Amino acid sequence: MSERFDYVVLGGGSSGCVAAGTLAEDPSVRVLVLEAGPPAEEHPETLSADGYKYAFANDAVMWERFTVPQRHAGDQRFFVGTGSVSGGSGSVNGMVYTRGAVEDYAEWPSGWRWADVVPDFERLERGLRPRRRAPTRWTEACISAAVACGMERREDLNDGMLSNVVGYEWMTYEGGDRRSAYVAFVKEPGPRPNLVLRNRARVNRIVFDDRKRAVAVEYEHDGVAARVEVDREVVVCAGALETPKLLMLSGVGPSQALRACGIAPVHELPAIGQNLHDHPNVPLFFVSRGLVDCQYPQLYSFYRTRPQADLPPRQSDTCYVFWPAPSAMKQAMQRMLPGKVLPPSLYDGPLKTAIRSGLDLAFGVGATNRIVDHLYGIVVILGKPRSRGSVRLGSADPRAPVVVDPAYFSDPADMETMVDGIAMARRLSRAGGLGAWRSKELMPGPWNQSREALARWVGKNAITTYHFAGTARMGESASAPVDTRLRLRGVTGVRIADASAVPFTPVSAMNAPSMLVGLRAASYCLDEHRGQPRR
């Protein structure tokens, strides 16, 4: 099967749906989206605001992916799955929509600073229509605790001012519905003759001609080999873990490593797959006397725990999520526990099913739920990591998993920040209105007090926040594999339009910045090709 489109978008996740929907606003261009996962409509929980916890625990809409053992984190493998469904991770996450801080964008290239990107965020928000959730007794107690610890209560956490603040996060929902990028930019506008979203389409490689121009994409659709010819550009939106894989499978990346996998290099770009960074986190758990009357992780705070860190004076280095256990404790354990306790050889077998079934039974007992109703977490997130890892190929087979090494805590300063963050979380649990709930610390527990003990505990209990970035970073220098208009250097007709291009992750979540990149990539494509003939 062979077809021809102007633009082929690789990945129908958050950035891919924004890019495709924006491109298709020009009725003269033809756009094809290739998404490896199933349609969202087959999994209604991905379209429901209340369904986020069920989507997160559903293997059918997640990439099952693990890191290599992390030397500085107890040699554990981290689960680093991401959404694989129409809308991608934006269809399975907690719906948090955060732009980031002014200081975050000061690290980005010229043309991408805070004042430059605010109009783009506003354009996104006209489609997404994010909003905040109503306060509850517990969330107001948490805010009181943060204020007592020196944070400022702010009504708008998207104004760029995230220095020592607490408030209600903007979330992409409306009534009982999730407003993902898929809903807002593809589904809601209705069928368009110039936009095709093809699910269950796994991309194998981009095809280049002898002038290093992208001319086609080879993929499998429902197991059948297919090829699509490209008249204008390939827009790569597969995410920070899969985009570098696709580029390397296509012959773009570190040539020596490509040859070692049996791939003929097309263009040498050593930085592809490098600069991987993420927000690791560790949850502290407390049981309180009061009922936790909240069903969403709707409350965030940002704080500078280490004034001596090499960051701008007002840059927060940690984020604190007040997480209500009644909202999703069972589903979170069903997702995370098998990967924590099972060796790789047993993970995909019946023991994973048995663990999840056991949790179903345990949470079917009234006593369990009565405990969980009083349980909450304060999640300490490392907002400005210094550690950098990599993504590399393990094989030339597109079906083989990519080798992910985030190198968590390889820079000792990251662990120092996390340990200081634990001290702040403990203060929060005892302060202000939250202190009146007389919480008892369950994890890490009073026996973990020294910095050395807490560092060991972090290594064993840390998890990802799924904010992967940087593996095809944009920049003004020739060493950056992507230029500031998101064009892949050294080849023609390929644009990177997802978190891979983000050079430094913001202190906050990555979903909104990823959509920003997708929107700008599409705008650049249309600007550059408007009025030009097709190939």
Image (spheres, rainbow, N blue to C red):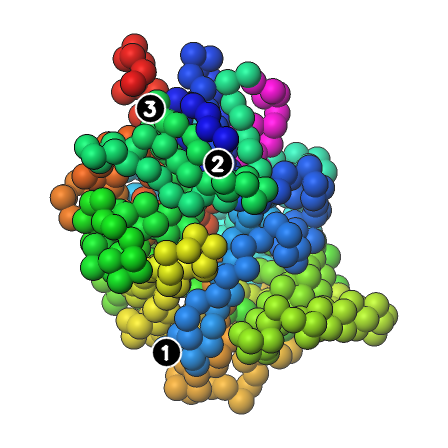
Classify residue 484 as left or right of residue 62.
left
Residue 111 at what x, y percent from top left? 24, 33
* Nearest the eye: 34 or 162: 34
- Give left or right: position of 242 versus 113: right
SS class, disc 1: loop
- Report which residue position mark 2 lands on: 226
Residue at the spot x=32%, y=30% of the render?
215
> Given the image, on which type of amino acid does mark 3 rest?
Arg
Q: Position of residue 370 (x, y in %)?
A: 80, 70
Pointer 1 residue:
71
* Residue positioned most to the bottom: 447
- Quadrant, the C terminus: top left
Taking 308 as reference, is 76 above or below it? below
**Which numbered circle lies on residue 232?**
3
Q: Residue at x 75, y 65 (%)?
A: 373
Q: Compare marks 3 and 1 and give the one earlier in the sequence.
A: 1
- Mark 3 residue element: strand
What residue type is disc 1 on? Arg
Q: In the image, is 452 to the left or to the right of 362?
A: left
| Location of residue 128 by image quarter | top right
Which of the 4 image quadrants contains residue 501? top left
First of labels 2, 1 by sequence position:
1
Q: CA distance from mark 2 to mark 1?
A: 41 Å
Q: Is residue 250 left or right of residue 88?
A: left
